[in-house]
Amino acid sequence: MKTLILMRHGKSSWRHNVSDRERPLKSRGKNDAKLVANQFVKHNDSPKFIFSSPANRALSTCKIFTKALKIPETEIKVIEDLYDFSGESVIDFIKSLANSLNEVMIFGHNHAFTSISNIFGDNFIDNLPTSGLVKINFEIDNWKDLKQGTTEFIIIPKELK
């Protein structure tokens, strides 16, 4: 069995004159990420393997989670291919994971994460909002055999307020 946890980055700020990759989180993005992280801690053991897009907003969201999960930031693996909006590179990355990794958490972007949630999960999501989290379980032994799984839960920050 394999488990995939997808976490979309928190709400980012457009107030700064920086590139898309460097856009920071808004205070709402930080607060929503903390809300979701605290709810996730109630549901789940800590994932052993954490991967993040190199974009500032995704990596900042990831660091909020690792703090809540009491995981050292040194455990975060930043993967260039996760800076992807279509989902193709993310799916290729997932399918290339070592089979020794049974549960992984990935921090990244939309529309990739909504698409992946709908392709591989069994709960349709119109749009995974910022700071939204989806956990999907798969009855597979090899990541390369990725096929539709079962959505265990979805955490949406608006539903926690």
Image (tube, grey):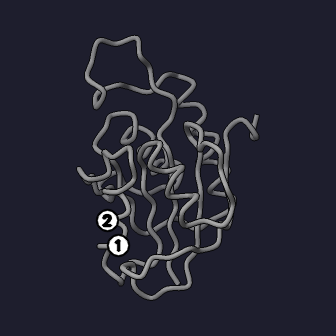
Residue at x-position 44% and y-position 49%:
112
> Quick one: label 1, few (<14), some, or many (20+) residues within 10 Å?
some
Residue 145 position within the rendered picture, expressed as x and y whole percent measured from the top left: 41, 82
Q: Residue furthest bottom?
A: 141
Q: Which residue is mark 2?
A: 92
- Between the residue at mark 2 and the residue at mark 1, the CA separation in whole angstroms equals 5 Å
In the displayed structure, 104 sits above or below 27; it is below
Which x, y percent locates residue 161? 76, 34
Q: Is residue 140 above or below residue 134?
A: below
Residue 160 picture quarter: top right
Task: Give x and y (percent) for residue 109.
Answer: 43, 43
Residue 4's place in the image compared with 110, above or below, is below
Q: Kindly identify the amino acid type of the residue bearing the numbered disc 1.
A: Lys
Q: Estimate how packed mark 2 is, as few (under 14), some (14 to 19) or many (20 or more) residues with alpha carbons within 10 Å.
A: some
Kind of element beneath mark 2: helix
The residue sitting at 65% across, 45% down in the picture is: 126
Name the side, left or right, on which 138 lies relative to 92: right
Say which amino acid is labelled 2: Asp
Front one among 79 and 139 = 139
Q: Which mark is residue 37?
A: none
CB atoms of marks 2 and 1 within 8 Å: yes
